[in-house]
Image (cartoon, grey):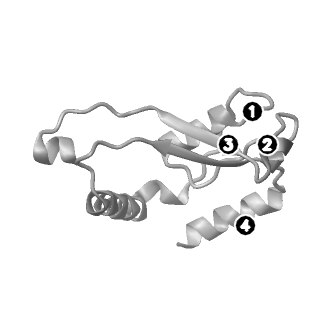
Amino acid sequence: MLKKEQGLDFSVMPLEGMWWTPDMREFSVEHKEHWLWTMMIMQPEEVTAAHFEQARAREVQRKKDSPSHHRAFIIEVMGRHSGYLALMAAIATGSELAVVPEHDIAPETIVADMLATYAQ
């Protein structure tokens, strides 16, 4: 949006993640289910909250208008015990749901989430 409207030239920064536990003395790679996390992408200074909201609203509308939004695609990516690749693929493609091995999820929950998404 800013590249087209204002002719700004900038690179998209890499996705960065932070993982922690409430008590860092208990942080363990064997118990990833206890981790809290956040993912971030640095934005150029020119990106304001108004720009972000405008882009978000446009994408929400685009998804609603898309004839393919009543389809489901289930993909499996390599990674074995790490959901990093699945999470990155989900973020990159605008997925509604990502299932990763770090969090147990019942198949019924996946179906319920998909049906709730289609109902929007």
Q: Residues within 10 Å of mark 3 (few under 14, many from 20)?
A: few
Sequence-wise first label, 1 or 2: 1
Task: Tell whether label 1 touches label 4 (CB within 8 Å).
Answer: no
Q: How far apart, in angstroms, are the residues tagged by discs 2 and 3?
A: 13 Å
Q: Amino acid at mark 3?
A: Trp
| Residue depicted at x 22% and y 48% | 46
Label 2: which residue? 102
In x, y percent, where is residue 80? Answer: 79, 28
In x, y percent, where is residue 82? Answer: 75, 32
Sequence-wise first label, 1 or 3: 3
Q: How far apart, in angstroms, are the residues tagged by discs 1 and 3?
A: 14 Å
Mark nearest the camera among 4 and 1 is: 1
Q: Quadrant of residue 8?
A: top left
Q: Amino acid at mark 4?
A: Ala
Q: Secondary structure at mark 1?
A: loop
Task: Tell whether label 4 touches label 3 (CB within 8 Å).
Answer: no
Label 4: which residue? 112
Q: Specify the label residue 19 is tagged with.
A: 3
| Residue depicted at x 65% and y 37% | 86
Sequence-wise first label, 3 or 4: 3
Q: Amino acid at mark 1?
A: Ser
Q: How far apart, in angstroms, are the residues tagged by discs 1 and 2?
A: 7 Å
Mark nearest the camera among 2 and 4 is: 2
Mark nearest the camera among 1 and 3 is: 3
Is 96 in front, or is 49? 49
In x, y percent, where is residue 32? Answer: 81, 41
Sequence-wise first label, 4 or 1: 1
Q: How far apart, in angstroms, are the residues tagged by discs 3 and 4?
A: 28 Å
